[in-house]
Amino acid sequence: MRKAILALALTAFVAVGASATEDATTPGIPSALDGSFPILGEIALDEALLGGSADYCVGVGFDGDNFWVSSGDQGTGTCMFSIIDEFGNLVDQVPQGAGASGWGHRDLCWDGTYMYGSFSTMVNAFAGDYQYFNFFIGYHNPNRAQAWDGSYFYTANFSDPLTRMEFTAWGAPATCTPLASFDGVYGAAYEGGEDILYLTSANYTGDLYTCTTDGFPLNVYTCMPEYDIQGGCTMACISLGDVLCVLQQFGPDMLTFYDIGAGPSPVDASSWGTIKAMFR
């Protein structure tokens, strides 16, 4: 491994996990700065935690209590959701449903009622009991990245454009508006404090992008030197605070909790109002 399993400072809890599934570790001293943002904690997604689903993890979403990690069918013959708490404990593990195959549902997002993901042109919704509920038709195939800002969904697919999707009705096509292109996008997460999107990349450069909800690029950060290829991502409010959780494609795969508030500011506060006015 390029870095030891981290974790939390002083009174904070350690985010523990497994290797390519999810695994547990012991408390440690967090590093001062990793890439563009400090790493507050990690969960290793290894076989000790996830069994045969380890090594095939791709997406992550947070439902307010637990993380949902999606993994492909290569290890078990079934695409799985692994439900993990912030301390690295496996809460449940269930088949993805909705006919998922191959790598299954990629990045995931939660709208307060359903968890959404896609492995085709459909964006599938899963209820809080992890069961498939319904779908709408998105812009890409698959609608790889997934984020929700309270009004709109956002998706992208590698170098296909970041696209805003307005939910219309179950089973129907969403109203889709392509916004901008970013290289290698795999995951998306909406950060409400700044009203911006974080985009992870699978282009082997470790790039982590930020942009407005209109697609205007703000900054490019990095997950290097630890990680160079990312899966999905999500924002989460946990005992560590408000963190950006990124699924790192590694050996084992990792859930990494970044303190984005401690890193460089995505945009100077004095100019933010002007920028929003220009691109609304």
Image: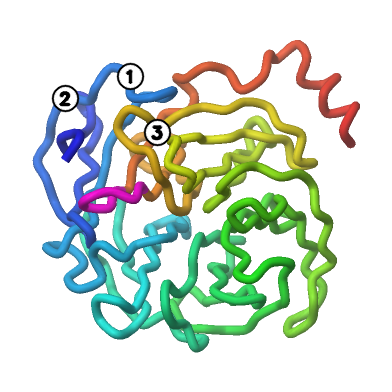
* Foreground residue among 17 and 9: 17
Residues at marks 2 and 3, CA–CA distance in whole angstroms: 15 Å
Q: Quadrant of the C terminus?
A: top right
Query: Are there few (<14), some (14-19), or many (20+) residues within 10 Å of tag 1?
Result: some
Q: Amino acid at mark 1?
A: Leu
> Which element carries disc 3, helix, strand or loop?
strand
Q: Could you tell me residue 7's position as x and y percent?
A: 21, 34
> Which element carries disc 1, helix, strand or loop?
loop
Label 1 with label 3: CB-CB less than 8 Å: no
- Please name the colour scheme applied to the rendered image: rainbow
Task: Specify the label residue 146 is tagged with.
Answer: none
Among numbered discs 2 and 3, the one appearing first in the sequence: 2
Task: Specify the label residue 29 is tagged with.
Answer: 2
Mark nearest the camera among 1 and 2 is 1
Residue 145 placement: quadrant: bottom right
Q: Could you tell me residue 66's position as x and y percent?
A: 37, 58
Q: Is residue 166 above or below residue 105?
A: above
Q: Is residue 250 magenta?
A: yes
> Which element carries disc 2, helix, strand or loop?
loop
Question: Residue tagged by mark 1?
Answer: 33
Q: Is residue 52 above or below residue 268?
A: below
Q: Could you tell me residue 235's position as x and y percent?
A: 50, 45
Q: Amino acid at mark 3?
A: Tyr
Question: Residue tagged by mark 3?
Answer: 258
Label 2 with label 3: CB-CB less than 8 Å: no
Among numbered discs 1 and 3, the one appearing first in the sequence: 1
Query: Are there few (<14), some (14-19), or many (20+) residues within 10 Å of tag 3?
Result: many
Q: Range of the magenta residues?
A: 248-254
Position of residue 226 in the picture relative to residue 105 (left or right)? left
